Amino acid sequence: MANLTATAAAPPRPLLRAALLIAGFFAIDKAAALLRTVIIARVFGVSPLLDAFNAANNVPDLLFTLISGGALSIALIPVLSEYFDQHGRAAGWEVFSMVANLAFVATAVLALLVAVFALPLVQSELGIAPGFDASQQVLVAQLMRLNLVATLIFSVSGLVIGGLQANQHFLLPALAPTLYNCGQIFGAVVLVPQKPLLAGLPLPALGLGVHGLVYGVIIGALLHLAVQLPGLWRYGFRWRFGIALHHPGVLRILVLLGPRLAGLGAFQLTELMRDNLASRMAPGSVTALTYGWFLMQVPETIIGTAVGTALLPTLATLMARHSPTETERSAQILSTALRVVMALTMPIAVAAWFYLPPLVQLVFEGRAFTPEASKLVVFAAR
């Protein structure tokens, strides 16, 4: 377990340990994600079926990002850190419960609306995939409805990450994405194929096709939540029913949510419009862009996201004390972290530009993934 206590006199070493722990697990997660991506790529190539699966993720991802995964979870951490530090765990968990209840209800209502209007959302000129043919659009709508089950699970699991990180606990939240990828790998290896995918291993093959990928996502979401539950019990979590929008803590979180909502919402909408345009291009364009984005994110996640995840709870606690000394210390920590991130990511970005083509050929090519598919992915990643 990774604990660190943010005090004015605390040395930076605990932050470094936390960042290294998170970076290590993020590296494992990216390795699992790469394995998942390679397996799926070799089964489907850059085909219309995989285009449909990737396009179907857009609206569920948008709901998750805006409600609990990115915007709300980040807004939650500073307020929870202050409550745990100044009011005790019981008060902090009360705020957490009310916010989690609100997020789940909001996600359920929006998910129901998306499920009802899934096909028009896909077919609209400003929707998800207006360029797909009619059968492919129907498939996108089906997969999107299934994917909303995982979104409901993530509406809670994403906030649990914030609750544990506000307690300076980073191990289980860092492990959760890896188990999510394991669920997807199970879907690709066991649920998708008509016959065993891995030669020599007596694995079952349920033959669910591309739908098996979505069932793998749902299994992964359940694992993502389940692995974090012991952390909640360790820190004295007690669930409280009810939503109190007038609660000062909830109000502060909603106020902090606004700017983050605007930023992440704009980014997620660009993802949606990217696939909207790609759906009008040659088959495989949506998948090539998705894989290119994944490869581009690897160094960013392992370095930048790891450092930011370790820093946020500590910086939030220091700033909440409203002390000039603590504020100055926060600025120094942030400045050092930014320099470290820049120093590490720039050389990696340069190296990736030159070595990406042979790397993609070595790792991805095989079965349904052709050299032409490699060229598309490399072009998108660059």
Image (tube, helix red, strand yellow):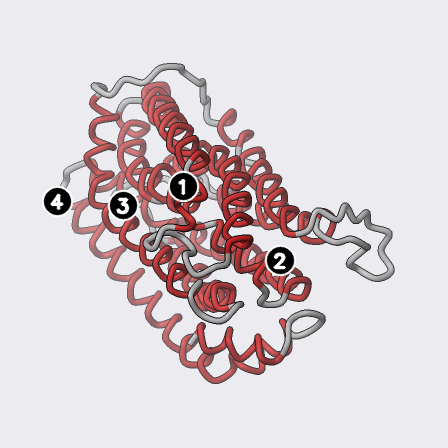
Q: Are marks 2 and 1 in contact (CB under 8 Å)?
A: no
Helix or strand or loop: what does disc 2 sit on? helix
Looking at the image, residue 192 lies above or below residue 297 = above
Residue in the picture at 41% in, 63% down? 300
- Residue 35 visible in rendering: yes
Question: What residue is pinned by disc 2?
Answer: 36
Please give the label number shown on residue 324.
4
Residue in the picture at 20% in, 45% down? 259
The amino acid beneath tag 4 is Pro
Helix or strand or loop: what does disc 3 sit on? helix
The amino acid beneath tag 3 is Leu
The amino acid beneath tag 2 is Arg
First in sequence: mark 3 or mark 1?
1
Where is residue 301 shown, x and y percent of the image?
Answer: 44, 59
Q: CA distance from mark 4 to mark 1?
A: 37 Å
9 or 35: nearer the eye?
Answer: 35
Question: What residue is pinned by disc 3?
Answer: 315
